[in-house]
Image (tube, rainbow, N blue to C red):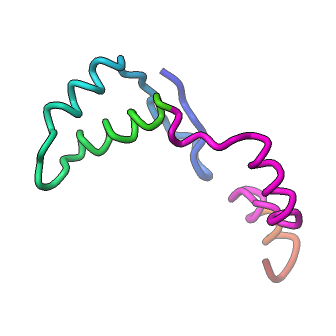
Amino acid sequence: MEYFQHGHQDRPMPRTNKPWKQIQETLEAHKGEEELSPEAEIAQVEEMMVMSYLACPKEKTLRQREKYFRNVWFRGLRQLLQEAKEVDFV
């Protein structure tokens, strides 16, 4: 089990890997449902991850980051809190 830092707290976030067959079985079991269950929604996202549907082409992503977000910097909560201590306005 892996743990990730989340926000300003360290808290366990278990990471699991399901076998492809289990993902397919879950999708098949919920096929045709009028309203998707949470299990079916999770299986859909897992399917997209396995099939790399959520992946972005690296070169294109880097070009767009340089073109559209050149001057954009993202701060984490710790950095924001530190800056708030140092200046009056963040």
Residue at 29% across / 17% down in the picture?
Answer: 21
Q: Residue 23 at x, y = what percent?
A: 30, 26
65 vs 15: above or below = below
Q: Outermost residue toward the bottom?
A: 89
Count the marks: how many?
Answer: 0
Q: Residue 41 at x, y = what percent?
A: 29, 45
Q: In this view, does 6 lie to the left or right of 42?
A: right
Q: Is residue 34 left or right of residue 45?
A: left
* Residue 44 location, quadrant: top left
82 vs 36: above or below = below
Q: Residue 16 at x, y = what percent?
A: 42, 25
Q: Is residue 72 left or right of residue 50?
A: right
Q: Is 43 colored magenta in this rendering?
A: no
Q: Residue 47 at x, y = what percent?
A: 39, 33
Closer to us: 85 or 89: 89
Q: Is 80 colored magenta in this rendering?
A: yes
Residue at 13% across / 32% down in the picture?
Answer: 29
Closer to us: 12 or 39: 39
Q: Quarter holding the C terminus?
A: bottom right
Residue at 21% across / 24% down in the picture?
Answer: 25
Chain part drawn in magenta:
52-81
* Residue 35 location, quadrant: bottom left
Q: Is residue 26 left or right of residue 83?
A: left
